[in-house]
Amino acid sequence: MPRVAAALKALAYPRTRRVGGRRVRFRLMSTVDREALLSFGRALPAEDLLFLRLDITRDEGLDEWCRNIIARRTITVLAESDGRLLGYGSVHHNDLLWTAHLGEIRIQVAAEARGTGLGRALAAEMLALGQHLGLDRLFVQMTREQTAARALFERLGFRTEALLADWVKTHDGRLHDLLILSHDTAEHAD
């Protein structure tokens, strides 16, 4: 996928910037990060695990993620400080599907790094990545209860596309409404 290589070159990872008073290094995930992501997932609060689209607390979930990294269907940027993984942002896309012009953003921030601006920094990285990949539109999916995530993306210009009643069934068997927000990448042009 030449456009992936070009996008990653243009964004010049790894790079470091200040976020919430600390130096944070943003770098691309590779398959060697599998165990670090497994530890990260297992350290997440139980309520966060209810809404993960891919179970990153299980080997099978990380294996799937790594397969998508290798196939370049997923590009993940890790955020680290002082040798600790604080969060990640991913853009998921597939050139072979009829939705090849779309990319899905997924972001997760460790509990200790919330409220520092890291989620917003990762979202900005994903917007830039989507633009450099030539994707027309980026979208996020979340439950209606995830109000902080919704507010973050709305501040970045995402708009509600759909609200699907009882669309998500969490591991505990409860049903939740699914909210889909999107952003046209042309609106984010630098």
Image (cartoon, grey):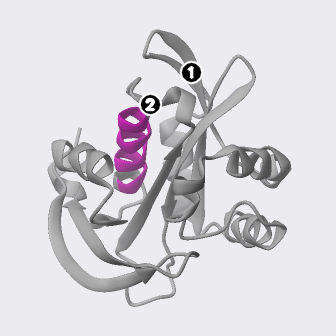
Q: CA distance from mark 1 to mark 2?
A: 9 Å
Which of 26/113 is in front?
113
- Residue at mark 1: 24
Q: Residues within 10 Å of mark 1 (few under 14, many from 20)?
A: many
Residue at x 33%, y 56% (from the top left corner): 146
Tell me the kind of residue under disc 2.
Answer: Leu
* Magenta stretch encompasses residue 126: yes
- Please give the name of the residue rendered at 49% of the width and 79% of the height, measured from the top-left corner: 95
- Residue interval drawn in magenta: 119-130
Is residue 8 one of those drawn in magenta? no
Q: Main secondary structure of the magenta part?
A: helix
Dot 2 corresponds to which residue?
118
Q: Where is 161 relative to 31, above or below? A: below
Q: Residue at x 35, y 39 (%)?
A: 124
Image coordinates of residue 90 in percent, x first then y, are 52, 55
Q: Residue furthest bottom?
A: 98
The quadrant of the image that shows the C terminus is: top left
Kindly identify the residue that appears in the image at 55 percent across and 59 percent down.
4
Question: Do the CB atoms of the residues marked 1 and 2 lie less than 8 Å apart?
Answer: yes
